[in-house]
Amino acid sequence: MKVLVIGGGAREHALCRSLSQDSAVTELHCAPGNAGIAQVATVHPVDQLDGAQVAALARRLDADLVVVGPEAPLVAGVADAVRAAGIPVFGPSGEAARLEGSKAFAKDVMAGAGVPTARSYVCTTPAEAAEALDAFGAPYVVKDDGLAAGKGVVVTSDREAALAHAASCESVVIEEYLDGPEVSLFAITDGTTVLPLQPAQDFKRALDGDEGPNTGGMGAYSPLPWAPEGLVEEVLETVLQPTVDELRRRGTEFSGLLYAGLALTSRGTRVIEFNARFGDPETQVVLARLRTPLAAVLHAAATGSLDQLEPLRWDDGAAVTVVIASEGYPAAPRTGDVIEGLAEAEAADGTAFVLHAGTRADEDGRVLSAGGRVLSVTATGTDLAEARDRAYEAVGRISLKGGQHRTDIALKAASRAG
Ligand code: AMP
């Protein structure tokens, strides 16, 4: 199978790493990729938001499967362009990707599917926003209705700050605050059959102890030793399958990766948000534990034959990933700094490895930072404590001027697991 992956972050590096280890994959390409991806795939400079360019590249490579990683190309309709060219594609249509691209659309689908989520109002004027804030009370949850790379949400007890964020967005969703721990659960679907993956937890705040601004994600781990038994089955039955069925019923069939961000509240499981693609950085830990070769799974989703797939096989152990971000992230990340120690950080036995997010190679072959999140240092182990130790040991070998990372990724879960 010749596979083309679209995107250039650590999620795409994780996808490419798994695909490169799959003996069914005879050729692996990525566009645009990054310095790390270039070590396992042939990279191509294309505009990932341009469906015609991506489809032309897929045709030229004679690709058997195109995997679209990030949300922006999906919302821009890149999967539609590839599908129209007659090439199997893993990723939903632009219309179905509105499940992520529009919070208001997602709320409407959830209402139609009877999926439990926070009560909410869509507001377009300051007066409407103020009324909605007062209806729910503090803490306030204010979400930009459009795509905001995980940074359009403000959760605050400061009414003025909540109003200011609402005023800065064209259209906002204001909703009730959900208490309780968060879980990310991914499912692979062909539009009918839904195959849940293993749950993970990510860390969205920039600083230790969940302090600081929201980010795209600073780390993740899987499995969740504290999660209630039967959680995956419950979410499949009450969230994932009804959502996929509702979208099909509406004529906006969703195939690809359905990501449910969940809160396990005192009143039951609630959906915080849906995403239309693999989450970053949870993908890094989920794929590190997947034993089933990846290409056939993605291809089955792209071709409507998931019901014929054998059950997925998983590693019993654990995986932890720690994101190294550049100085100034998320507000004003500085780029162009040399990264050292990448080879030293990798374990010879594969239990620790470095996935590149925002990196590029210069003319001398040095690897430079090229984005806010720079690396996703990932490790596996028999349990979370071991995976965590290995990940942080690897982080310690890497140097990046001004680089920042959290020191408490998976800390609580590892100690809870004993
Ligand atoms: P989202 O982009 O919708 O995932 O929101 C980003 C983060 O904001 C989530 O991971 C939560 O930590 C927080 N958040 C979003 N919605 C709510 C809510 N209704 N109640 C509490 N926290 C929320």
Image (cartoon, rainbow, N blue to C red):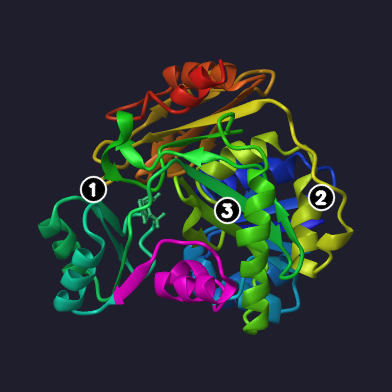
Q: Which residue is mark 2?
A: 26
SS class of the residue under badge 3? Answer: loop
Vertical comparison of 37 with 321: above or below: below
Q: Residue at x 41, y 69 (%)?
A: 103
Of pointers 3 and 1, the one earlier in the residue sequence: 3
Please give the range of residues in magenta: 95-122
Amino acid type at image mark 2: Thr
Point out residue 364 in the picture as x, y percentages from the top left corner: 45, 35
Q: Which residue is mark 1?
A: 331
- Nearer mark to the viewer, of 3 and 1: 3
Point out residue 225 in the picture as x, y percentages from the top left corner: 59, 29
Vertical comparison of 134 with 18: above or below: below
Counting the numbered discs, the total is: 3
Of pointers 3 and 2, the one earlier in the residue sequence: 2
Along the viewing direction, whichever of 337 and 324 lies nearer the viewer: 324
Point out residue 106 in the picture as x, y percentages from the top left corner: 48, 71
Q: Which residue is mark 3?
A: 278
The quadrant where residue 317 appears: top right
The quadrant where residue 126 appears: bottom left
Question: Mark 3 to mark 2: distance in Å?
Answer: 23 Å
Q: Is mark 3 within 8 Å of ligand 1?
A: no
Question: Mark 3 to mark 1: distance in Å?
Answer: 24 Å
Amino acid type at image mark 1: Ala
User: In the picture provided, is 79 more to the left or to the right than 389?
Assistant: right
**From where the camera sits, is residue 37 visible?**
no
